[in-house]
Image (cartoon, grey):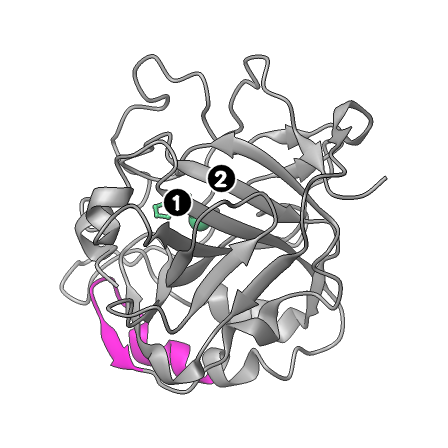
Amino acid sequence: CSSKYVLSALHPMWQGPLVAPGGNRQSPIDIRVRKSVFDPHLKPLTPDYDPGTCSQIWNNGYSFLVEYDDTTDKSILKGGPLEDNFRLCQFHFHWGESNAWGSEHTVDRRLFPAELHMVHWNSNKYRRFEEAVMEENGLAVIGVFLKIGKRHEGLQKLVDALPAVRHKDSVVEFTRFDPACLLPANIDDYWTYAGSLTTPPLTEAVTWIIMKQHIEVSHDQLAVFRSLLFTSAEEEVQKSMVNNFRVQQPLRGRTVRSSFT
Ligand SMILES: NS(=O)(=O)c1ccco1
Ligand SMILES: [Zn+2]
């Protein structure tokens, strides 16, 4: 997908504004479970992904993006809080240098070692990602927390490809990966709120859908994420790609809804 136009301006600790000007729906946030409001009208989420649309992995100098061909409605997300059809564009992760932290969102202040983001754009209203990224209901991002535990068999194909994109701006062909294998068993229980991108351009375009159930990956699998570099092959000083998460943002009176009681 064309998220490269959105993320390529990134520097590891990107020099952009820490809070978008006038931002009152910024992300990430802490999800206060007891303050979330059960919404019985929320529908089950219905992702429908075609592994054939998987195209490449790209180290953009902030995370690694697994990119999908989003020129047709082959890999889409519907249902849940969404009124329209959203096309999968890419997925990526945020993680820490230690297992004690790394996620962007927290649940009652609880940090996870990493967080998966599956980025989709509204293909009923817009024609491409770059357009949707500037619009209020342009994007839908699924967030899934990662915990250290048993090896994630489905993730291993991705982990084995990462050494090929060790440096910033490297790209490797990557096909036939089904992103649904990274979703938890239960995708009916989630929190949802109106927020923003957590990396530049930080636009307030995102309907966030944060899964209550986490997935498990092994310590060794996460260690390969940490073997990636923020820096390009030419740079003298190599910097490990770790702690690529944004600081939490004020809730500003927003309500977080839950699909479960
Ligand atoms: N981290 S995230 O999913 O909010 C994102 C996607 C594109 C830019 O930032
Ligand atoms: Zn993200």
Q: Residue at x 35, y 51 (%)?
A: 121
Residue receiving disc 2: 207
Among all residues in the image, which is located at the extreme left?
Answer: 234
In the rendered structure, find residue 260 and report the number of the disc placed on it. none
Q: Inspect this view and state whether residue 96 appears.
A: no
Q: Residue 132, image x and y in percent?
A: 27, 43
* Magenta extent: 160-173
Whole-Å distance between the Cαs marked 1 and 2?
Answer: 6 Å
Taking 31 as reference, is 254 above or below it? above
Task: Determine the image quadrant of residue 55.
Answer: bottom left
User: Residue 228: within the magenta?
Assistant: no
- Amino acid carrying label 1: it is Leu
The reply to whether the residue tagged 2 has its Cβ within 8 angstroms of ligand 1 is: no
Q: Inspect this view and state whether residue 236 appears.
A: yes
Residue receiving disc 1: 139
Labels 1 & 2 near each other (Cβ < 8 A): yes
- Amino acid carrying label 2: it is Thr
Q: Secondary structure at mark 2?
A: strand
User: Residue 169: within the magenta?
Assistant: yes
The reply to whether the residue tagged 1 has its Cβ within 8 angstroms of ligand 1 is: yes
